[in-house]
Image (cartoon, rainbow, N blue to C red):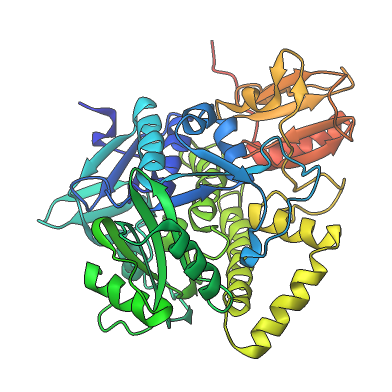
Amino acid sequence: MHPTDHPDVIIAGCGPTGAVLAAELRLHDVRVLVLDRDTEPASVVRIVGLHARTLELMAMRGLLDRLLDRGRRRPASAFFAAIDKPAPAGLDTAHPYLLGMPQPVVVDVLERHAADLGALVRRGCAVTGLDQDDDGVTVELAGGERLRARYLVGCDGARSTVRKLLGVGFPGEPSRNDTLMGALAVSAPQDEIDAKVAEVRRTCRFFDVNPFGDGVHRVVVPAPHVSDRGEPPVLDDFRQALLAIAGTDFGVHSPRWLSRFGDATRLAEHYRVGRVLLAGDAAHVHPPAGGQGLNLGVQDAVNLGWKLAAQVRGRAPEGLLDTYHCERHPVAADVLDSTRAQVLLASPEPGARALRRLLTELMDFDVVNRHLTEKTTAIGLRYDLGGGHDLVGRRLRDLDVAQGRLYDRLHRGRGLLLDRTGRLGVGGWADRVDLLADPSADVDAPCVLLRPDGHVAWAGEDQHDLDAHLARWFGPVTAPASP
């Protein structure tokens, strides 16, 4: 019998968020079953960008090299509202760049990683019902099959069935404007395309026709008049939209893939209802301005994974699982506000264009440019963990440490005490927290306690205070077994 025949956790949806969550749970020996309604992985070759914080998380789990080999780096600039400013110098990360690649490649790497760790993925399994009680969740599939698990996590996208079955509110603004995106061949000469794109982008920021490689162009064009958003676009939709915006369709033909996205902005009221949780687009949707969507979902998964694993294994201190909503819900709310502002700044209206010119001037100040870059890439994020040292709540960048790099010590998804004094220890928490004694580490504190997601849970040099924080984040010391 496969260990996931009786899973601890069922995950609905095997996109990037679901795959990362499955892997995070498997690092702690949680039995995981991932259900995906599609019979095959999505084939739409939408290009996504992995920001610095997501690249850090991939490095923490030993996945970064697999992604670097299959992506293309670009400078960490022009993220906010596509305002063309150079990247701030000395960003606090070892990965100050954007890594662009097709989304199916990202999903493939992440799903293989989860499978290698022992997660089971079943495709063609649509969740149609759920019922939870004090002991677990019963999930019903199309066709009538019923499965049982201790917890269910909905990572099933913007139209999340899990969220709807839970009855969780999803307030916000509906989609008002659609944008078409695809990879198509063109007949027009490149110099004519470049000239027209430059002309149109003076007033329409969400427009682009760029060489994509392999004989095709990436076409992004607003499509304000969409009769049925549930229907996939066709080639003629692109031709009509290009004619309306640019006065020419550039002779587009032979599409490789076509898609559309809207500018809906919504945030789930709750990320947890009993034994059912939400993550990724099931919990939040927003326009793609700044390229934060996939990144936000992956970061949800890494925040949730170790906490849910501790809950399943009976090691979670009281309230730990609830910190998932408390920490990630405000982050999503901030991203939604940021994308709202960026959509406004892309408007051709005179007031919005004046505001864009003003912000463009302000971004010449390093402090403004740095703040917006750190916000978009999430490296400036600080969770409210109750005060203390300035490092508490922040993520710690990858550092040179004794025998390698700091993030290499986080591959197993455990906590880590980085001790520069040589006097502190993890005691009875050694089964879930590692110790690295390195007096030369470049950290502005005597010792720091890192959570499995790389955020600083404590900084100081008092063992008694450290023990209290070890218990707060990693639960009570496990009593030794009787002889």
Q: Residue at x 78, y 26 (%)?
A: 418
Figure quadrant of the C terminus = top right
Examine the image and state in which quarter residue 169 appears.
Answer: bottom left
235 shown above or below 447: below
Task: Tell which of 192 and 434 is nearer to you.
Answer: 192
Q: Residue furthest left?
A: 143
Residue 10 pos. (x, y %): 33, 46
Figure quadrant of the N terminus = top left
Task: Tell which of 315 and 201 is nearer to you.
Answer: 201
Report whether residue 175 is seen.
Answer: no
Left or right of 383, for residue 368: right
Examine the image and state in which quarter residue 154 appears.
Answer: bottom left
Q: Residue at x 61, y 49 (%)?
A: 318
Circle count = 0
Residue 136 pos. (x, y %): 35, 50
Residue 35 pos. (x, y %): 27, 47
Examine the image and state in which quarter residue 198 appears.
Answer: bottom right
Task: Tell which of 86 and 152 is nearer to you.
Answer: 86
Left or right of 148, for residue 397: right
Left or right of 480, for residue 108: left
Q: Residue at x 29, y 78 (%)?
A: 240
Left or right of 325, for residue 248: left
441 shown above or below 372: above
Residue 278 pos. (x, y %): 44, 58
Report whether residue 198 is seen.
Answer: yes
